[in-house]
């Protein structure tokens, strides 16, 4: 195949060799694989050092969607990244996380600046109108938002931008029927539709907040016991497929459960945890104690107890995919320190591939993700007219998605970047591998 790039866009893709235009540069990629730049649909980029942002490119992630940040901060960051003033991926933004009147976590805490509240359905036109005027690329409903306010937001937005949710007080099935476009975290947003009735999230139930120490133990147990073939489950899968709602998976957060602590401690990606995230994580030692994996430890739950739950999340992903539903990859990098930016999506792809195969996993972070962002005419495939965002890999990711790591060049908008050079520039953390 030949790919012709003019400026920042792809202009031709043809079988065989194209004549080189006058003044053109020819690059021989014989024996290599070219695939679209990866898209991470769930990041929190204002919680990582600006100097760490090239990590995304170094791992092959050419586009990210920030799903929770202080509006002014993330608007500025988007402008800097999209203009090329700052080195890193293209960026789309959702602005703040929209709670109801209860707080999902502490507004005064280190990450509280990304929270905002829509106190009632009456407040929707002003609040959401302002966000749309500010140019957000989507709206994110958050954990404590009650169903009536959530539905009022979906109705007010009226499909002008995608609405997604990290749901708690609502049942996702209600909002799927109301027209929500995406759900975040396969293990949180659909939880109320799968768990035992006496284990649900929400007012009057056992778990009202993600800060509740019971939150993780209940969630993990709820998933372990969930029947994925019950009538309730079938109804949920059916609605997801009928309404073509995007399921953002974020399986990577439980990657530690899969690989085990010993393996994770040897993981070379650890050194790329951004200093800002490491600093935040250090404060957590007060809660989790001095442990050799403190820099990676999620802090709220023990990954070793999540193996069965993770298998269930992968099974939900598989059933949905095979029924014709939409699966998109996301990571929550920035929100949690590990896996670090960019590399988190490579972990996500590995876990997705186990559930939906290598091609399904790659599409979940390229073409399907681009359509979710309503950017399919610009991103997500190697097609004339799209941005020249693509990866050159010295391997075959369709055989094994871990081969994406054999990345030789990353193109963003036709500009080539050397992953190894980018990795030399980014700040390293001082965690000692294997200790
Ligand atoms: Zn998140």
Image (spheres, rainbow, N blue to C red):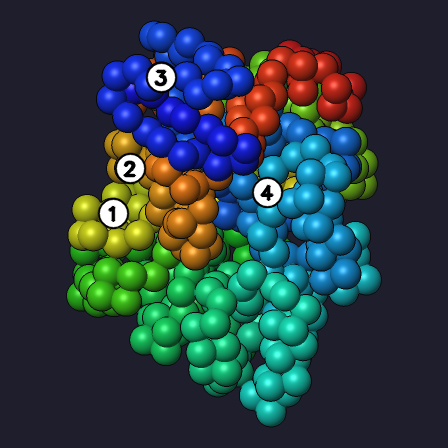
Q: Compute the Cα span from label 1 to label 2.
A: 8 Å
Between tags 2 and 3, which lies in front?
3
Q: In which quarter of the image is the N terminus?
A: top left
The residue pinned by badge 1 equals 321
Image check: 89 left or right of 404?
right
Q: Compute the Cα span from label 2 to label 3.
A: 34 Å
Between tags 4 and 1, which lies in front?
4
Q: Quadrant of the C terminus?
A: top right
Q: Which of 106 and 357 is in front in this view?
A: 357
Task: Classify 10 Å Cα crowding around label 3: few (below 14), some (14-19), many (20 and above).
Answer: few
Between tags 1 and 2, which lies in front?
2
What mark, if any, has residue 19 been given in the picture? Answer: 3
| Image location of residue 6, percent across then percent down | 49, 31
Q: Which residue lies furthest to the bottom in this view?
A: 122
Q: Does the residue labelled 1 lie within 8 Å of ligand 1?
A: no
Q: Mark 1 or mark 2, which has the lower sequence index? A: 1
Q: Compute the Cα span from label 4 to label 1.
A: 27 Å
Q: Is mark 1 on a helix, strand or loop?
A: helix
Q: What residue is at 35 percent from the left and 70 percent from the top?
A: 176
Q: Mark 2 or mark 3, which has the lower sequence index? A: 3
What mark, if any, has residue 360 been given in the picture? Answer: 2
Q: Mark 3 or mark 4, which has the lower sequence index? A: 3
Q: Residue furthest front?
A: 22
Q: Do the residues labelled 1 and 2 touch (CB within 8 Å)?
A: yes
Q: What residue is at 59 percent from the left and 42 percent from the top?
A: 90
Q: What residue is at 72 percent from the left and 15 percent from the top?
A: 424
Q: Compute the Cα span from label 3 to label 4.
A: 31 Å
What mark, if any, has residue 211 been given in the picture? Answer: none
Task: Classify 10 Å Cα crowding around label 1: few (below 14), some (14-19), many (20 and above).
Answer: some
């Amino acid at each position: 195949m030949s790919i012709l790039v003019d400026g920042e866009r792809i202009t031709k893709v043809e079988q065989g060799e194209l004549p080189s235009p006058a003044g053109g540069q020819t690059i021989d990629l014989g024996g290599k694989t070219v695939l679209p730049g990866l898209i991470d649909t769930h990041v929190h980029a204002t919680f990582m050092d600006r100097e760490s942002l090239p990590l995304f490119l170094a791992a092959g992630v050419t586009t990210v969607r920030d799903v929770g940040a202080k509006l002014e901060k993330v608007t500025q960051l988007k402008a800097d990244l999209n203009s090329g003033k700052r080195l890193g991926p293209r960026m789309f933004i959702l602005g703040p996380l929209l709670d109801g009147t209860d707080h999902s976590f502490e507004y005064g805490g280190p990450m509280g600046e990304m929270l905002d509240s829509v106190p009632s359905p009456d407040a929707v036109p002003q609040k959401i109108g302002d966000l749309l005027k500010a140019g957000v690329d989507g709206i994110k409903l958050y954990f404590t938002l009650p169903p009536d306010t959530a539905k009022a937001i979906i109705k007010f937005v009226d499909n002008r931008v995608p609405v997604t949710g990290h749901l708690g007080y609502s049942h996702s099935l209600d909002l799927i029927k109301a027209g929500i476009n995406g759900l975040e975290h396969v293990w949180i947003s659909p939880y109320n539709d799968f768990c035992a009735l006496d284990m649900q999230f929400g007012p009057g139930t056992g778990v009202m907040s993600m800060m509740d120490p019971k939150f993780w133990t209940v969630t993990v147990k709820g998933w372990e016991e969930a029947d994925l073939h019950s009538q309730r489950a079938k109804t949920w899968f059916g609605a997801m497929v009928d309404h073509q709602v995007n399921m953002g998976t974020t399986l990577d957060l439980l990657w530690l459960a899969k690989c085990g602590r010993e393996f994770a401690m040897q993981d070379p990606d650890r050194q790329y945890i951004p200093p800002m995230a490491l600093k935040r994580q250090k404060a957590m030692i007060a809660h989790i104690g001095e442990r050799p994996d403190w820099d990676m430890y999620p802090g709220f739950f023990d990954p070793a107890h999540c193996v069965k739950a993770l298998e269930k999340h992968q099974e939900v992903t598989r059933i949905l995919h095979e029924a014709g539903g939409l699966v998109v990859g996301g990571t929550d990098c920035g929100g949690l320190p590990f896996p670090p930016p960019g590399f988190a999506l490579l972990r996500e792809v590995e876990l997705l591939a186990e559930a939906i195969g290598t091609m399904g996993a790659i599409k979940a972070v390229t073409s399907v993700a681009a359509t979710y962002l309503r950017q399919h005419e610009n991103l997500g495939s190697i097609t004339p007219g799209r941005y020249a965002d693509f990866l050159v890999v010295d391997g075959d990711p369709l055989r094994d998605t871990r081969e994406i790591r054999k990345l030789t060049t990353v193109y963003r908008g036709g500009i080539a970047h050397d992953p190894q050079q980018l990795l030399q520039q980014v700040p390293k953390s001082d965690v000692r591998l294997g200790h």
